[in-house]
Image (cartoon, coloured by chain):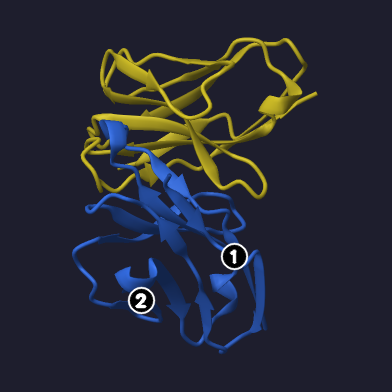
Chain colours: A yellow, B blue
Amino acid sequence: NAGVTQTPKFQVLKTGQSMTLQCAQDMNHEYMSWYRQDPGMGLRLIHYSVGAGITDQGEVPNGYNVSRSTTEDFPLRLLSAAPSQTSVYFCASSYSNVLGDTQYFGPGTRLTVL
Amino acid sequence: AQKVTQAQTEISVVEKEDVTLDCVYETRDTTYYLFWYKQPPSGELVFLIRRNSFDEQNEISGRYSWNFQKSTSSFNFTITASQVVDSAVYFCALSEARGNTGKLIFGQGTTLQVKP
């Protein structure tokens, strides 16, 4: 099993550009999520999905879109990049959204917006 | 409100020293889960342990041990005989029960540097 994979590993964007961060898992997990990590703030939830076709907003959803057409994939789209979106982005998955299910994280994407 | 506090921003020790990373949490839930994750310099997040609120037994895994105390709302992590490979950022996290979002509430992280 590859676990949770993310591409790209690094990305530099100019303000106003759009892009998609890719996330895939091969563990047949129903639950997937996106977090962003900023210095001194830990990780914060952006969007999550409890299964294919179902997504919902987390704590900091503004400026991001997600979709979940398959169980395996959960891409994160930046519609019009802003410098405030410079961050490290982590995708995670777990068997379900049942309280306490362990979430496994991908390797992260380091995004810089100029 | 739910919150996780890791008051130690950075800790530096010399190899073979023991070190304890503190984690204090706030929640009104009676059922909850606590986690520790390790983020080595390569950047990925590695799951270390999960503990539920009804199990206060301490856990030991090799050089790692965890002390969960509901009375003080703490879930501290001790590394015995630290090694250079333990250098990393360590995150404590709390599961949020409200809304079945699967959300984890993370502390700010503690950067541990183990010097040879």
In the rendered view, does B72 fall on the left or right side of A80? left
Report the residue that reaches farthest toward the right: A114
| Identity of the residue drawn at 34% across and 44% down | A103
User: CB under 8 Å between callouts 1 and 2?
Assistant: no
Q: Which mark is residue B7?
A: 1
Q: Residues within 10 Å of mark 2 (few under 14, many from 20)?
A: some
- Is residue A52 positioned above or below B43 on the image? above
**Where is the N terminus of chain A found, in terms of image quarters?**
top left
For marks 1 and 2 on the same chain, the one whose residue lies earlier in the sequence: 1
Disc 1 residue type (three-letter): Ala
In the rendered view, does A100 fall on the left or right side of A79? left
| Identity of the residue drawn at 22% across and 38% down | A95
**Where is the C terminus of chain A found, in terms of image quarters?**
top right
Q: Nearer the viewer, residue A14 or B110?
A: B110
Look at mark 2 in the image and give the residue it sits on. Answer: B67
> Looking at the image, is mark 1 or mark 2 nearer the viewer?
1
Q: Are marks 1 and 2 on the same chain?
A: yes
| Identity of the residue drawn at 24% across and 61% down | B53
Q: Nearer the viewer, residue B81 or B24?
A: B24
- Where in the figure is residue B98, as x and y percent of width and height? 30, 36
- Where in the figure is residue A24, as x and y percent of width and height? 38, 29
- Where in the figure is residue B32, as x and y percent of width and height? 27, 52
